[in-house]
Image (cartoon, rainbow, N blue to C red):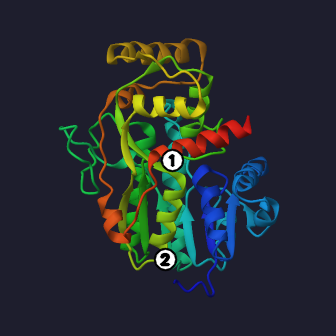
Amino acid sequence: MPNFKDQLVLVTGGTGLVGSHLLFQLLKSNIPIRSIYRNKKTLTRVKHVFSYFSDNAEVLFNKIEWVEADLNNVPKLSDAFKGVTHVYHCAAYISFEPNKYNTLRKVNIEGTANIVNLCISHQIKKLCYVSSVATVGHHSDPEKLINEQTDWNPEDDNSVYAITKYGAELEVWRGTQEGLNAVIVNPGIILGAGYWNEGGSGSLFKRIFKGMRYYTNGITGYIDVWDVVNAMEQLMNSNIKNEGFILVSENLSFKTLQIKTAKALDVKPPTKEAKPWLLEIAWRLDWLNHKILGRPRNLSKQNAKSAVRISKFDASKLKKALDFKFKPINDSIEEVSQLYLKDL
C-alpha cells in the first residue's frame, strides 16, 4: 500500500466527468484533496455524481477543499499549489468546432503549460495528465492495432481538439525533461453518468433515448469512467514515471454501441446507415449553416471522417504494467443507462 502521509492532492477539472469520479475514488483513501473550479454552478454536478454512489454526498463533498482558479490565471493557480504533493490534471476544453481553435489552444496547451511550470516550481512529486486517444496516430491498415508507439502524423486532417491535446502532451513531456515525474493516460470514449447535457458520451445516451435514426460503422475504443480513474490512481501510486498509457476496454463499432445502449434504455435502435457520402454532404451543410446563420457547428469535417474510420486500440501496455482488468463495456452501458433513467 502507498504511504499517504504528508500528501496533498490537487485535482484540476474536478467538476467534469473524469474529475468528479476521480474525487469520489480518492476520498476512499482519506487523502487530503484540493480541487479547483471556475464556476460555482458546476459544483452541483459533483454532488450529483456523488449521490449516485453514496447517501452522504454532501458530507463527502465538504471533505474536499475547493479553490476558485483558472488554468490561465497563474497567480490564483499558484495559490492552489501551496502544499500540494501530487497533481491530477483533468481540466480541458472540449470542442470539435474549428472556430474554437484559439480557445482550445489557450486552455489545453497554455493551461497545461502553466500546470507543468507550477509542478516544477513547487517540486510536485508526480503529475498525471488526462489526454485522449485522439492524440495517438493511425495506421494505413485499419485492422492493425494502435498502441503507444504509433506515431502521430501532424500532416493528417486532425481535429482542432486532437491538435491541442497533442500540444498539451508535449508540454508534459517537456516538463519531464526538466525533472518532473509524470504519467499520461489516453482514454478512448469514456462511458460515465451525470453529464447528459455536456457533450461526450453522456449526451450520446440522451440522444439515443430520445431517438436516433442513423448509425455509422466506424470503430473506436471505449472505456468505463471507473476504469479511467482506477488506472490513474494506480499509476500515480506506482513507481512508473514518464510513460503514456492507452486506456481502452473494448473496440466497438458506433452501430454496436448504439444498439446496445438502445436496448439498455429500452428504446428503438437506429435503423439507417449514414453512409460516407451522406456525411460528406452533412458536414458541408453544417458549415454553411454556421457561416450564413451563425449556428454552432454540430458536425465538422473531421467528425464526419471519424464516424466511419476504423481505429482499433491496444491497451496491453497498461494491462501488463498494472495487471489491470477492464470492466466489460456491456456492464458499463447497462450501469450508465440505469443512472440516466433514474435521473429522468
Q: In this rendering, does residue 71 appear at all? A: no
- Compare marks 2 and 1 and give the one earlier in the sequence: 2
> Tag on residue 267?
none
Q: Nearer the viewer, residue 109 or 57?
A: 57
In the image, farthest residue toward the left: 141
Task: From the viewer's perspective, tell me whether residue 211 is left or right of residue 66.
Answer: left
- The residue singled out by tag 2 in the image is 237
The image quadrant that residue 179 belongs to is: bottom left
Vertical position of residue 83 compared to residue 72: above or below: below
Cα separation, mark 2 vs mark 1, equals 27 Å
Point out residue 151 in the picture as x, y percentages from the top left corner: 24, 51
Task: From the viewer's perspective, tell me whether residue 335 is left or right of residue 215.
Answer: right
Identity of the residue drawn at 48% across and 73% down: 236
Tell me the crowding category of disc 1: few under 14, some 14 to 19, or many 20 or more residues within 10 angstroms, Cα based.
few
Identity of the residue drawn at 66% across and 43% down: 339
Tell me the crowding category of disc 2: few under 14, some 14 to 19, or many 20 or more residues within 10 angstroms, Cα based.
some
Identity of the residue drawn at 53% across and 24% down: 297
Point out residue 273 in the picture as x, y percentages from the top left corner: 39, 17
Q: In this rendering, does residue 56 appear at all? A: yes
Looking at the image, is mark 2 or mark 1 nearer the viewer? 1
Q: Assign a secondary structure to mark 2.
A: loop
Point out residue 83 in the picture as x, y percentages from the top left corner: 65, 80
Three-letter code for the amino acid on which mark 2 is drawn: Asn
Q: Which of 77 and 259 is in front in this view?
A: 259
> Tag on residue 331?
1
Three-letter code for the amino acid on which mark 1 is drawn: Asp
Vertical position of residue 315 compared to residue 295: above or below: below
Q: Assign a secondary structure to mark 1.
A: helix
Point out residue 331 in the picture as x, y percentages from the top left corner: 51, 47
Vertical position of residue 113 compared to residue 93: above or below: below
The image quadrant that residue 318 belongs to is: bottom left
Q: Which of 272 and 122 is in front in this view?
A: 272
